[in-house]
Every structure is written in C-alpha cells, then in structure tokens.
Image (cartoon, helix red, strand yellow):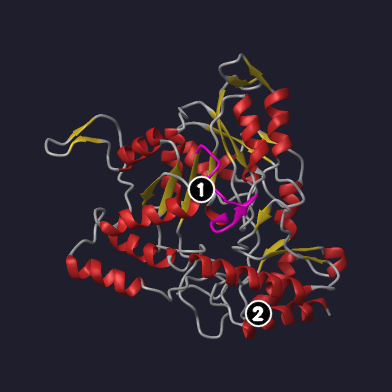
Amino acid sequence: MKSQNSFEPGARIDGVIPLCVPELRGNEWQYVKDCLDTGWVSSVGSYVTQFEELLAREIGVSHAVATVNGTAALHVALLCAGVEPNDEVLVSTLTFIAPANAIRYIGAFPVFIDAEPNFWQMDVKLVEEFLVNQCDWDGHEVRNRSTGRRVRAILPVDILGSPVDVDPLLEIAKKFALPVVQDATESLGSFYKGSPVGCRASVSCYSFNGNKLITTGGGGMIVTDDANIAQRARYLTTQAKDDPVEYIHGAVGFNYRLTNVQAAIGVGQMEELTNYVAIKRENARRYRDGLAGISGITPMPEAEYATNSFWLYTILVDKERFGKSSRDLLADLSRRSIQSRPLWQPMHRSPAHLGNTFVGDSVADSLCRDALSLPSSVGLSQRELDLVVDAIRSAAR
C-alpha cells in the first residue's frame, strides 16, 4: 500500500487531503456499463470516435486521434512531424520526463530550453537565440553547429495549466521551417489570446492520466488541422495495417490505440470539462486570497495573454523570507496529512538525459528548488482548502 506522501493519482485516502485525484461525477458509469453490456470494450467502438470528436471540437481543430497514453501521443506526433534518428528537437527542460523520452524513442536528441522566470514556461527568446546564434540555416534545414545534427522540430510543454507564449514561437518556427509539436496536456481548458490552447501548433498532444483535469485512467490524444498528419497518426497507432484482411503492414507501427471503455470514461469527463475549469479557477482565487500577505510566498502567476486552468496550483517559497524551504514546507504539510509536490528535476539535470545540449541559465533550477504544488483536485472542498492555507500560515509562524 502506498503512503499518504505518494504523488501518484488514485482514490482518496481517509483523512488525507490529496494532491490531485480524479473527479467522476457525470455519466461515466452509464457509458462504461454500455460498453460492458454491448461487448464493445477494446480499441474499436463508438466511444473512441465520440471522445475524439468532442476533444477536436473543444480545441477547435479538424482532427483528433486517441492513443493509449500521452507519451504514445508524443511519440507518434514527433514521427508525423518528420523527426528521424539523429535529429534534434528543442524541448522545455522544466517538464515531466515523457516528452524527452519520446524524442529518444525515435533515436533523436533533445535540446533542452530553459524556462522564463515570469510564467515558468519555455523561454521563447532562448529558442530564437539558439537557432540564430548556435545553428546554421541554409534556407532548407537548420543544423546545430556544435553537434552537426539537423534540428527538426520544437516541442514546447505547457506546465501547470499555463500556456507557452506560442505566437512568437510559431513565428520563429516558420522562419526556420520547423514544425511545432505542443504538449498541451496540462493546459487543457486554458485559453491563449482567447483561443483554446493547442489549436495553433502543427500538432498538439494531451494525456488523460489519473491526475489530469479530465481522465480516462490512462489515455492520450493527438490533435491537428492537418489531414495528412491525422491520417498518418491513425495509421501508425493501429500497427500500420494496410490490409485488414490479409494483415499486410507497410511500416513499423504501434499498438497505441485507446480502448472503448477508457474512451467512454473520457466522454463522460469531457461533458464536465467547462465546469471543472471553473472550479479550478475559483480554487486558485481562494488560494491567492488566502495566502496573500505571507512573507516569502509567491502565488501562481497568470500571463496577460492567458486564461489559466490552474491544473496544479503552485506557489514559490522563498527560504530566506518564509523561514523554511519548499521541501521543509512539504514535510510540514505531510505531517498534517496534506499532500503537496515539488516540480520535476529539470531534464538537463536528469541522469537519463545527461550530455544533451542545454540552452539557458538557472531559471528551471530555481523553480525546481522553490516551487511547491498544492492540493488541486476538482473535488477539493472549502474546508480542505482552508486547512491547506491554515497549515501554510502556521508553518510560517
């Protein structure tokens, strides 16, 4: 049995305020029962199609392809974007490890881009500086001057519910003929300049793991306006089958399709998405008001270009001013049966990805040191939120 300090998503534990657990309050039971009653439980069924159509409509794109998880979505999206072995992909260094791993699955190499200090997302200026000052561009392809490798794509990762400033990034990408594969998982339900996050990139990806804004238990999705990318993604995720009768396969494909049972849960979750975002935003407001005035605590920012879904409400803890580090506060909260979580080790520090190019300074390192994500479940009650705020105030005293 996992301890109360585990960060893995799951069911609630009595007496513990969890970090972020699923909220199943809609038609999920009804739709799953329909799958079981009709026998459509595997990777073919009407709920897969419904789930794809609902998400495509929500994001404002023409095509969506469901996958077994978010990492699979990233893997296939990068292949569809033309990434090949020995290429390089510019990717956020402050991220969960999945995007970096997906790049390596192809035999390509990540170039890690530091975060910007204001909203904690990929620093677009560093992307431009790297491509202009450290690469050669012949009008057709761009190569990293130090490694000689072709730079083939940019993979920004929206973290914590806030989007990357994607318009200037797309301008830079267009200048160097680079597709943008956006990992928009954590910004589902957020808006960028009034449009749903994920609609502007060449292709965007989502995960529906248990702690995400909506969940299918696992699951992922590739969304795009490009019919060719969508067709290729659907082909690769279904074992690249050219002839379903004779079982002829024209390429090395993957068993990456989502099951109908999981998609049924996803359809029920999508029906609640707007309500869930409203709850997250209201909880963020209450956290901001409740934590106001505590020396050394910086509330989660919201960019002027964004409407944030606040997937995980995250604060910065200044050790000198607050009197304790973020990890000290994590331990204090844990003793009160309140789960919290630091940010990920930056990817350029990860033992799994050492030796790859890093562009930047120490912003991601500072955010990893000081940031702490607080309980953010959709089902978080007012009493639980007050207990979290009171615990932080008590820790300060």
Asked which secondary structure carries label 1, the reply is: helix
Instruction: Give the residue at x 63% y 63%.
Output: 310
Q: Residue 46, located in which quarter of the rendered image?
A: bottom left
Task: Please provide the residue range marked out in magenta.
Answer: 187-202
Q: Amino acid at mark 1?
A: Ala
Look at the picture and state if 17 lies above or below 224: below
Q: From the top left corner, tell me how far across and down residue 371 is, in percent.
A: 71, 60
Q: Residue 63 vs residue 370: left or right?
A: left
Q: From the top left corner, tell me how far across and down residue 349 is, in percent.
A: 65, 45
Look at the picture and state if 290 lies above or below 82: below
Asked which secondary structure carries label 2, the reply is: helix
Tell me the number on the disc at residue 385.
2
| Cα distance in 3D space between marks 2 and 1 | 30 Å
Q: Nearer the viewer, residue 264 or 343?
A: 264
In front: label 2 or label 1: 2
Instruction: Give the residue at x 74% y 38%.
Output: 360
Instruction: Give the residue at x 61% y 80%.
Output: 337
Look at the picture and state if 246 lies above or below 300: above
Q: Nearer the viewer, residue 251 or 339?
A: 251
Q: Main secondary structure of the magenta part?
A: loop
Look at the picture and state if 281 lies above or below 363: below
Q: From the top left corner, tell me how far across and down residue 164 is, in percent.
A: 64, 47
**Residue bearing mark 1:** 98
Which residue appears farthest toward the left when viewing the image?
A: 246
Of callouts 2 and 1, the N-terminal one: 1
Q: Quadrant of the C terminus?
A: bottom right
Q: Nearer the viewer, residue 306 or 146?
A: 306
Q: Amino acid at mark 2?
A: Leu
* Residue 194 lies in the magenta-colored region: yes
